[in-house]
Amino acid sequence: MGEKLTKADVDKIQQEIDHRKLDLRPELIAAVKEARAQGDLSENFEYYAAKREKNRNESRISYLERMLKYATVIEDHADRDQAGLNKVVEVLFLDENEKDSFKIVTPIRGDTMKNRISIESPFGKALLGHRAGDTVHVATEQGGGYDLKILSIREDSTDDDIRSF
C-alpha cells in the first residue's frame, strides 16, 4: 500500500514532476553536452558534476512517479469546527499548563520539528474529530498517556513546500 495523500498533495507532486521534466531536464541535458564538449572526460569535473545533477533529477522524477502510482488519495470529512486534515489545533497540555499549536497532516508531511502531526500518529489520532473545548487523552505505547484540552481549531491556508515530499 502506498502513501496517503490529499488531492492537493497529488497536484503538488504532479507540478514538481512536470517542472523537473519540462524545465530542469532540458537544462541538465544541455549542461552535460556542454561539459562533454570540453574534451578529456577523465579529468573533467564539470562533466561529472553535470551528470550527477542530471541523475539526481531523474531519480527524483522516478521517486515521485512511483509515489503517485501507489498512493491512496484521502479526503477530510471533518466539520469546520472539528480537528481534521490541514487544520491547526491549539492545545493546552494539562500536566504542564503549556500551550502549543499543531497542524494535522498526511503521514508523508508529518514533521514534529515544524509542529506538523500525522493523522496516523497517536497524537493526531487522538485529536481527529474533536472540537474546541474538548479534553482529549493521548495514549502512549508504554500504556500511559497525557491529557490535553483543545483551545481552538482553524483552517490553515498556508501552502506547504512542495519539496517536503
Image (tube, rainbow, N blue to C red):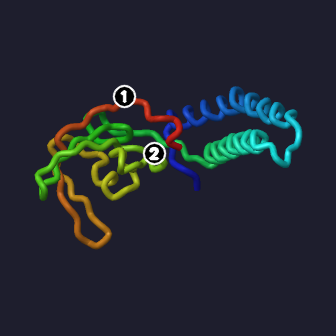
Q: Of residues 45 and 29, which is closer to you in this image?
A: 45
Q: For the N terminus, which image quadrant?
A: bottom right
Which of the 4 quarters of the picture holds residue 56?
Answer: top right
Q: Of residues 133 and 21, which is closer to you in this image?
A: 21
Report whether 22 appears left or right of 144. Answer: right
- The residue that appears at 71% across and 27% down in the rendered structure is 22
- The residue that appears at 29% across and 44% down in the rendered structure is 102
Q: Position of residue 86 (x, y in %)?
A: 37, 38
Q: Amino acid at mark 1?
A: Ser
Q: Of residues 137 and 64, which is closer to you in this image?
A: 64
- The residue that appears at 22% across and 65% down in the rendered structure is 145
Q: Position of residue 127 (x, y in %)?
A: 28, 49
Which of the 4 quarters of the picture holds residue 151?
Answer: top left
Q: Name the element at disc 2.
A: helix
- Position of residue 34 relative to residue 90, above or below, is above
Q: Amino acid at mark 2?
A: Arg
- The residue that appears at 24% across and 37% down in the rendered structure is 153
Residue that carries the numbered disc 2 in the rendered image: 109
In the rendered image, the residue lying farthest to the bottom is 142
The numbered mark at residue 157 is 1
Dot 1, crowdedness within 10 Å: few (<14), some or many (≥20)? few
Q: Earlier in the sequence, mark 1 or mark 2?
A: 2
Report whether 15 appears left or right of 129. Answer: right
Which of the 4 quarters of the picture holds residue 68?
Answer: top right
Q: Position of residue 46 (x, y in %)?
A: 75, 39
- Position of residue 28 relative to residue 143, above or below, is above
Dot 2, crowdedness within 10 Å: few (<14), some or many (≥20)? some
Report whether 73 appears left or right of 82. Answer: right
Q: Name the element at disc 1.
A: loop
- Position of residue 2 relative to residue 155, above or below, is below
